[in-house]
Image (cartoon, helix red, strand yellow):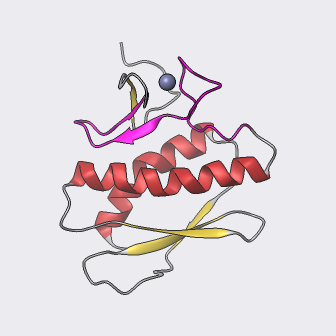
């Protein structure tokens, strides 16, 4: 898999493994041929999958936020299929209203889409606060 794509997916993958509660896997299976847009697949155990890609013209933090956004959609579908609450990662202030939104800030972060409040860097959601 392209190094830039690995670097872009690694943070959201850490959050998935720690907190998403679904057993997904990433496969080095490009689904498109655009030369500056490396891609791969994420698969659920039930055989459903989705592609994700990055854009080599984007900055590293934009890539992290873009890939988090794409993979988050599939996590939400996978959780729904597993009978889990679909809002992942849940907004701590509005847990019944929406998931957090990936933002290409420095560092790239999960934010509340209503208030814009940063909750955690992507890759550190649900881990101990770095105080
Ligand atoms: Zn919120």
Closer to the camera in the image, 89 or 24: 89
Residue situated in front as seen by the camera: 111 or 127: 111
Q: Quadrant of residue 42?
A: bottom right
- The x and y percentages for residue 70 are 47, 57
Q: How many marks?
A: 0
Residue 85 seen anywhere in this rendered image of the structure:
yes
Instruction: From the viewer's perspective, tell me whether residue 43 is left or right of residue 2.
Output: right
Residue at (50% x, 27% y) in the render: 127
Residue located 78% across and 66% down the image: 46
Residue 3 image offset from top left, x and y in percent? 31, 67
Residue 84: image location, x then y, percent: 76, 40
Position of 39 relative to 96 (above/below):
below
Q: Quadrant of the N terminus?
A: bottom left
Location of residue 75 in the rendering, given as x and y in whole percent from the top left corner: 61, 51
Q: In what quadrant of the picture does the C terminus appear?
A: top left
Q: Is residue 108 magenta?
A: yes
As drawn, which residue projects farthest toward the right?
83
To which quarter of the image does residue 34 belong? bottom left
Q: Which stretch is magenta? A: 85-111
Q: Residue at left 35%, top 48%?
A: 65
Q: Foreground: 86 or 14?
A: 86
């Amino acid at each position: 898999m392209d190094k830039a794509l690995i670097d872009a997916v690694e943070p959201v993958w850490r959050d998935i493994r720690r907190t998403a509660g679904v057993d997904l896997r990433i496969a080095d299976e490009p689904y498109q041929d655009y030369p500056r847009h490396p891609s791969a697949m994420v698969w659920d155990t039930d055989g459903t999958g989705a592609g994700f890609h990055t854009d080599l013209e984007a900055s590293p933090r934009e890539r992290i936020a873009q890939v988090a956004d794409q993979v988050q959609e599939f996590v939400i579908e996978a959780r729904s299929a597993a009978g889990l609450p679909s809002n992942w990662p849940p907004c701590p202030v509005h847990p019944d209203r929406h998931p957090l939104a990936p933002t290409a800030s420095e560092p790239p972060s999960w934010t509340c889409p209503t208030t814009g409040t940063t909750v955690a860097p992507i890759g550190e959601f649900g881990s101990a606060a770095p105080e």
